[in-house]
Amino acid sequence: MIKKPGHRNSLNSIVAFLGLLCFGSLAGADEVIETTAEYSKGANQCMSCHREGRDMAAHEIFLTPMGISGAANSPFADGNHDCETCHGPSAAHRKKNKDGTRPSPSIAFNETNTAAEQNEVCMGCHNDGNMIHWTGSMHEEEEVACVNCHAVHAARDPVMDKITQQEVCFACHARTRADTFKPSSHPLRFGSMTCSDCHNPHAGQNDSLLVRSTVNDTCYLCHAEKRGPFLWEHAPVSEDCTLCHNAHGSNHAGILKQRSPLLCQQCHSSAGHPATAYTSESAENSFQQRFLLIRSCGNCHAQVHGSNHPSGVTITR
Ligand code: HEC
Ligand code: HEC
Ligand code: HEC
Ligand code: HEC
Ligand code: HEC
Ligand code: HEC
Ligand code: HEC
Ligand code: HEC
Ligand code: HEC
Ligand code: HEC
């Protein structure tokens, strides 16, 4: 009952052989072979129905790096199974059942397959240095599939494009989306930067999937001047930028977590000098108002990220 082996049938025979090894003593060989999915003979057989202009057209994959048959180890390279390298042996899918339904391809990349089953296909070829930390990463553990982010049949995969990437992420990260639309934010919504400037979606060894080992090292990628060294450091700045700033967006200018003076008073005692902002005269007294108005504490402590002035100990200059 083994179908005439085509040149792409070697894996198929191995599957059948393993099947025999496992079940040969329990069931007749015929039954085993009947349940073994068959490969078609190449993409043409699929493209007769999935060509351009049809519903579920699949042709755009030939416009992507993966569709180049000449590329080493492309699904379409000699020795692989074209479409069925990913979709699994699917000869049965080409014909309707007697009741008019159509058997699914072995791997349809929809709800009939778990994320792990889908990812195994991709990792078969992409298990390289870039993917070392994928296994066990938060996305993997939350059962996010490669194809929740990647559209392999699109000529331009939206997640690979700076402008469109965030829409892919926002499908799941609604809170981050809301943050980037706040009055003060990193210019994500204008497409001049994107999530993967700060995050490695495939995960690395860093917290929050960051591209560098600490929050600050990630920020210094673009805000190098904040690294210093400063003669007079402001301790929280070299510790963690997110003590004062949100990473994505905020309702307060400068992507700050809080307005000054409250921002500063989270750490600095409101007794004594800083507290003068709240004395009873402060509303009328123009001297006191400089603690509250415009940049508040920053009116005098302008070098909030650190000072290189010999007498900048109180980061006023
Ligand atoms: C005779 C026409 C025909 C051929 C040949 C064909 N398909 Fe399909 N395919 C369909 C139709 C029609 C659908 C729509 C869903 C359905 O009717 O089950 C479909 C759906 C699909 C789907 C979507 C998943 C699903 O189950 O809905 C995938 C993936 C797919 N085909 C892959 C393939 C691959 C790979 C090949 C080649 C091995 C192939 N098709 C050959 C007709 C065909
Ligand atoms: C690199 C792996 C891969 C290869 C190779 C591949 N596919 Fe797919 N295919 C997918 C994934 C993943 C999906 C799920 C939807 C998506 O990500 O675009 C899919 C979806 C489909 C669908 C359903 C599309 C829809 O609109 O719902 C069809 C039909 C299909 N593929 C046919 C084919 C055919 C025909 C070929 C060969 C020309 C092929 N695929 C080659 C991975 C692949
Ligand atoms: C048979 C091997 C093979 C399989 C299976 C495979 N790929 Fe690929 N993939 C390649 C090759 C070869 C390239 C092109 C060279 C490269 O970028 O490494 C590629 C490139 C890519 C790229 C980069 C495209 C670009 O625009 O630069 C993405 C993203 C990708 N694959 C995702 C996937 C996903 C998701 C799956 C599973 C649905 C998958 N691949 C399955 C071999 C494979
Ligand atoms: C959370 C979304 C997301 C998931 C899940 C995801 N990727 Fe990616 N992938 C991306 C983004 C974004 C890029 C572009 C990276 C960049 O611009 O630096 C990318 C790039 C790639 C590339 C191009 C080469 C590279 O590493 O830059 C390949 C190949 C790839 N992904 C394969 C996969 C495979 C295989 C899986 C599943 C194991 C997967 N991806 C899961 C978002 C994702
Ligand atoms: C400027 C760098 C930067 C950019 C750009 C960025 N992030 Fe983040 N993201 C961070 C940092 C830093 C954290 C850790 C926050 C913390 O520790 O307080 C984080 C945390 C997260 C978290 C964890 C939950 C949370 O809010 O703390 C998610 C989810 C997230 N980012 C998604 C995204 C998405 C989606 C995009 C693209 C729209 C994006 N990020 C763009 C720096 C960035
Ligand atoms: C299919 C849904 C989905 C998509 C798409 C997705 N994520 Fe996630 N992501 C999750 C889930 C689920 C978590 C687990 C924590 C949570 O619920 O926020 C997570 C967590 C994260 C975290 C926090 C990791 C940590 O260690 O705290 C970051 C950062 C993140 N995603 C970035 C991205 C980026 C960037 C993209 C787009 C390239 C993206 N995600 C696309 C589902 C998704
Ligand atoms: C990929 C580059 C990049 C990285 C990494 C980056 N930023 Fe930015 N940042 C920008 C750009 C671009 C702007 C907008 C500058 C402008 O509008 O002139 C900006 C603006 C800002 C602003 C000023 C916003 C305002 O409205 O004045 C703050 C604060 C800021 N970033 C903090 C951070 C923090 C904190 C981190 C680390 C979590 C970080 N940035 C990482 C590129 C980056
Ligand atoms: C102690 C609180 C605090 C910490 C910590 C902090 N900042 Fe700021 N940052 C501010 C304040 C306040 C402003 C607004 C200053 C103003 O009004 O000019 C600001 C403004 C900025 C700006 C926009 C104006 C400018 O000076 O370029 C950037 C960019 C910035 N911060 C980056 C960072 C980075 C990167 C880190 C971490 C290395 C960091 N900040 C840590 C309080 C802080
Ligand atoms: C997360 C806590 C934190 C926040 C928020 C914070 N600071 Fe600081 N600040 C410190 C620490 C810690 C020191 C170092 C104190 C020391 O060395 O005794 C310091 C030092 C200072 C000094 C120098 C004091 C001295 O005796 O040398 C000034 C001035 C100052 N901060 C002003 C501000 C202003 C203005 C803001 C608001 C923009 C602010 N700080 C926000 C923690 C913070
Ligand atoms: C009108 C200018 C001015 C404003 C506004 C101002 N400061 Fe100061 N601050 C100073 C000067 C000047 C010193 C140095 C005083 C000294 O050396 O005795 C100082 C010292 C400090 C110190 C060092 C420790 C101490 O108590 O001597 C801290 C902390 C501080 N200011 C925090 C703040 C905070 C928080 C705010 C906002 C509520 C603020 N300052 C507003 C001028 C100002």
Image (spheres, rainbow, N blue to C red):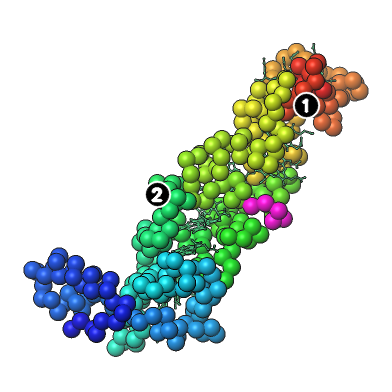
In the rendering, at what x and y percent does residue 263 appear?
Answer: 71, 29
Would you say 156 lies left or right of 283 here?
left
**Which secondary structure type mostly characterizes the magenta part of the structure?**
loop
Q: Is there any visible trace of residue 307 in the rendered image? A: yes
Q: Residue at x 51, y 78 (%)?
A: 59
Are there few (<14), some (14-19), or many (20+) residues within 10 Å of tag 2?
few
Q: Nearer the viewer, residue 255 or 76?
A: 76
In the rendering, at what x and y percent does residue 165 appear?
Answer: 60, 58
Q: Residue 210: which quarter of the image?
A: top right
In the rendering, at what x and y percent does residue 264 appear?
Answer: 71, 25
Q: Is there any visible trace of residue 182 in the rendered image? A: no
Q: Amino acid at mark 2?
A: Thr
- Which residue position is annotated with label 1? 303
Q: Amino acid at mark 1?
A: Gln
As drawn, 151 above or below 136: below
In the rendered image, the quadrant that contains the N terminus is bottom left
Q: Residue 80: which quarter of the image?
A: bottom left
Q: Nearer the viewer, residue 7 or 21?
A: 7
Q: Secondary structure at mark 1?
A: loop
Would you say 104 lies left or right of 47 here?
left
- Which residue position is annotated with label 2? 135
In the rendering, at what x and y percent does residue 108 appear?
Answer: 39, 71
Q: CA distance from mark 2 to mark 1?
A: 43 Å
Q: Which residues are magenta?
A: 190-194
Residue 193 belongs to magenta span: yes
